[in-house]
Amino acid sequence: MIKFIHVTKEYARGEPALKDVSFQLPKAQFAFITGHSGSGKSTTMRLVHMAERPSHGEVRVSGFSSERTSPRDIWKLRRQVGYVFQEFRLLPGRTAQENVSFALQVTGTPDKQVRSRAQRLLSQVGLSSKTGSEVHELSGGEQQRVAIARALANEPLLLLADEPTGNLDDRATRGIMDLFWEINAMGMAVLMATHDLDLVRRYPSARVLELDQGRLVYDSHEGQDTNGSVD
Amino acid sequence: MFYTLRETFSAFRRAPLLTSLSAAMVGLALFGVGLFSLAAHNLKLALDTLEERVEIVAYLRDDAGTDEIAEMERALSALPEVMLVEFVTKDEALVKARRELPEFREVMTDLAVNPLPASLEIELEPGSRTPATVDRLAQQARLYPFVEEVQYGQEWVDKLFTLRRMGGVTATVLGVAFAMVAALIIGTAVRIAIFARREEIKVMQLVGARDGFIRRPFLFEGAITGAAGGALAIGLTYVTFRGILHYLFSIEWIPVEWVAAGILAGVIFGVIASSFAVRKHLREV
């Protein structure tokens, strides 16, 4: 699903955000990327989403290579990769259903199907009773569920989650994590960035990749064969 | 297309104040252009009226034969630069002088002999009233032996055309300056409106919308904002025109093509500004 091959990411100023990072994430795997602030977690996520390109090395995601995918074709990759953020990034002034419908509409879902599919997605994340609520009327956990429903709109193969529980209390965090596991159980790979090690320890079956100052310093699955299911 | 139209109009519905302000800014920017157009058009009309008075008068000797005069009249009328040649007899010249110069009416009434010569008054086609053409035709008229003198007010014609050239250059420079200021204001107004919706653009990109799909509603919105601003500018210019006409002096309304060009300019500026602003945000993700 994801393959990082000696990836280094440098910016104009300061130290490189990532230094010679290599790893593979097979299909349907659940993995955490952990590390302190500035360790390179968000850069890794952005590279997977091809919001940025590596300075050296190559990133491959679901058959798309950072070396060969033109900016014009990135939309094709993004329909296969859902993205959830710490700050939800929902459109204010719209209802939960409108936020999910929006993602369906802009990716070309026929108008007749938009409403029913949005309702189904919101039911899937446990929000069937809140479809008509505006974003500001929802709790943090509910807003994140709407964001997850939106990320699932295109039935992606991979879900990226960048500190998705960072703004949530314990109860909401547990609910969101349960949801991620359910999604993963349906066969979707999940790559979640978090600095919360207590949260990571609660899910010992998940793979853990730890970054420190841009280097991959720990991989809980190191030595395991993951080549077969990449791409 | 249905999505594009729906998103465009729902954007107006969701942020009516912002979109109204954008259209108002566009309207005020184009209002400046409208006022300038009104002034430029009426200045042009005034110069055209002055220019119509440019004519060549060939004064004829008293012994000029009727056939000779008719031949000259025919020859001059055949020239493409000449619109009309009118023969004025000595008697007609005297009547005209009495009418146009009332202070000399008594002197002209007591005359035993009419001292005024017969003449040919040569009016020129609108595009031929230039100093060079006027001078060339005057030289041509002088070639006839029975022509006593040719007058066309050389100094007046030269001054008129200097004024026209100055007016043309000033109008062009000011017009370009007004248009540039309007373009900058329209660009800023549209960019502010799009900046307020940058999150929408990012979300669309994140979920995999194509750039063209993202861009379309914003371009449409820019076009509508520009058209609304253009219409507002025309309305304000018309109110000003009526005010001047009613309270100050008589002026003419600008040609309908200029009105259409004003609205079209608003639409084009709106689309271009939207295009640049959206492209900037598209590059951010």
Image: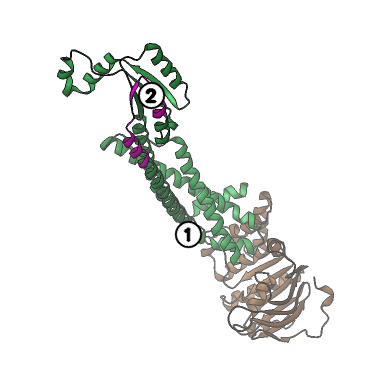
Give the chain coloured green. Answer: B
Sequence-wise first label, 2 or 1: 2
For badge 1, the amino acid type reads: Ile
Look at the numbered disc 2 and give the secondary structure of its residue.
Answer: strand
Residue B135 visible in the picture: yes
Q: Chain A drawn in what color?
A: brown
Residue B251 visible in the picture: no
Horizontally, residue A195 falls left or right of residue B179, namely right
Q: Which residue is mark 1?
A: B192
Query: Which of the image's four quarters has the C terminus of chain B?
Result: bottom right
Horizontally, residue A112 falls left or right of residue B258, namely right
> Residue B155 lies in magenta, yes or no?
yes
Return the mark for residue B53: none
Determine the residue positioned at 37% across, 11% down.
B66
Q: Which residue is mark 2?
A: B122
For badge 2, the amino acid type reads: Ile
x, y percentage for residue B45? Answer: 37, 35
Determine the residue positioned at 39% across, 20% down.
B85
**Is residue A136 placed above or below B268 in the rendered structure?**
below
Which residue range is magenta in the image? B137-162
**In-front residue for pair A110/B129:** B129
Disc 1 chain ID: B
